[in-house]
Amino acid sequence: MDKVAKEGQTFAMRLFIPLILVLGMGSCSIPEAPIPPVQENHELVVLTRNSPTTYYEDAQGNYAGLEYDLVKLFAQELGVDVRFVVATEFSKIIPILTKKQVHLVAAGLTITPEREKIIRFGPAYQTVQQQIVYNSFTLKPDGIGDLIGKRIEVIAGSSYVERLKQAKKKTPKLAWHEITTTEIEELLEKVANGEVDYSIADSHFVSMTQNFFPNLGVAFNLGEPEQLAWAFPKDVDPYLYGKAQQFFDRIQKDGTLRRLLDRYYGHIARLNRIDVVTFLEKMNATLPSYRKLFQQAQEITEIDWRLIAALGYQESHWDPLATSPTGVRGLMMLTADTADHLGVNDRLNPKENVPAGANYLLTLKEALPERIPEPDKTWIALAAYNTGMGHLEDARVLAQKLKLNPDSWSDLKKALPLLSKTAYYTALKHGYARGGETVILVENIRNYYNIMMKFEPAYKSPYPALTDTKEGLRLANSPAYLDKDATQKER
């Protein structure tokens, strides 16, 4: 095992903080009796589970997740309120549904023959692959036979159990433990820690978790790809089921589904293992020197300090002396013009460079049309940070010409790389740009930000944000700023 990988694993194991997904205040208890049809109470009751691939609370305290977004859109289309209830155990999801205590389940369920015997699935919206996950610091298993006699843990009631039962018919000595828990992340952590030899997870979740635990490896695929879908009672209300079919048909045709999938999963496979290990090591060795500066930048801009830090890492790897061949300099890699505009005297001074970079990002966000929703507005502003607002506007114009949505990051990701192609850039106002590099930069930042959100706590400033950029920079450079008592008096 190489030294960097060991350091990265040690850091990840030491700093791991389980993803805090506290949803009790935002979800309700599961009804004890069958509920009336949705059109009677004008309320859609949906059973989900607490996970980063379904339903969770994000860094800003808002609810998010692919299933959450899909259900909210569906409820809007029905013209009814929605009430989410969260399953405490995965194995209880289908029994609750069959008793009609909820209208539907939106919990990342895979369509399997066994499940289809007792429940009814709606249209499929995502394809995934079950994968055997192992600790890459150990010997990689080549097939089911290599799992015999090993510690294997899987979620009770999951489709993974069904696949293992099928495999056991050909490999009778195969054995495993079924764990009563809602979230697979706990089991993958145990694999990363060496507490369990193997587990099973869907491919999109494995890719996401590898950005937190770079020593998680995929040994081999288990069976054929499967599809995810909402689940309904076997004798589902025809009205509700018909509306769900219409809904998924619409969002597939108009691109809404594609954009949502890209929002949550379009960036997760961008980093490789060495990228993640290096970033984790830098979080341990370098970040402490600049954490307070990033948090001060949040106080000035109200942009999450972890996003500012992720941007700074992508730009300079947190090197305050970084200088590019094009002349951008410092931890946030500011151009001379940007620095002059923001009143920065020394771009190599992190106390000036960091808040200026954060303010520049804020300026770019505020320059974008108000109609652009989050998080798309943030990702688009990050693209402008790299390529400039002129080239970004060219990409948005080009997106419109290509009948793409210029307010959607997933669509702009298709237009930006075309800025380097003669057939396109010669007809645009600002000409040639390396738009493909811009896409890579933003997707990397999204990954670094996700890692930061897992390992670094949010920062809540006790002070109101400063809307005046020059005043904010003046305060950030003041010795009194580090003295909170003095700062409080000054304000």
Image (tube, rainbow, N blue to C red):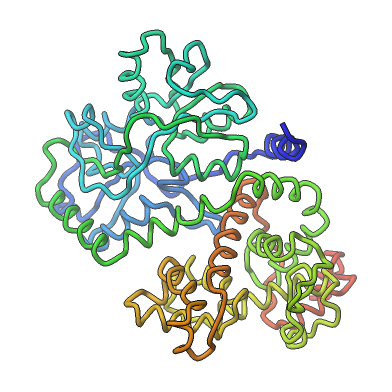
Q: Residue furthest front?
A: 422
Residue 354: x and y in percent read 76, 70
Nearest the eye: 137 or 152: 137
Q: Position of residue 209 (x, y in %)?
A: 54, 41
**Residue 463: percent from the left, percent from the top?**
71, 68
Query: Number of numbered discs present?
Result: 0
Left or right: residue 133 compared with residue 291: left
Q: Is residue 432 above or below residue 261?
A: below
Give the residue drawn at x 20%, y 58%.
Answer: 249
Q: Residue at x 60, y 60 (%)?
A: 445
| Up-down relation of residue 188 to residue 102 (above or below) | above
* Residue name at image x 45 percent, y 17 percent: 177
Q: Is residue 312 left or right of residue 174?
A: right
**Farthest-out residue, top:** 173
State whether residue 318 is above or below residue 105.
Answer: below
Q: Quadrant of the C terminus?
A: bottom right
Q: Measuring 17% from the left and 53% from the top, which residue is drawn there?
A: 245
Asked where in the image residue 103 lies, by quadrant, the reply is top left
Residue 213 percent across, percent down from the top left: 61, 39
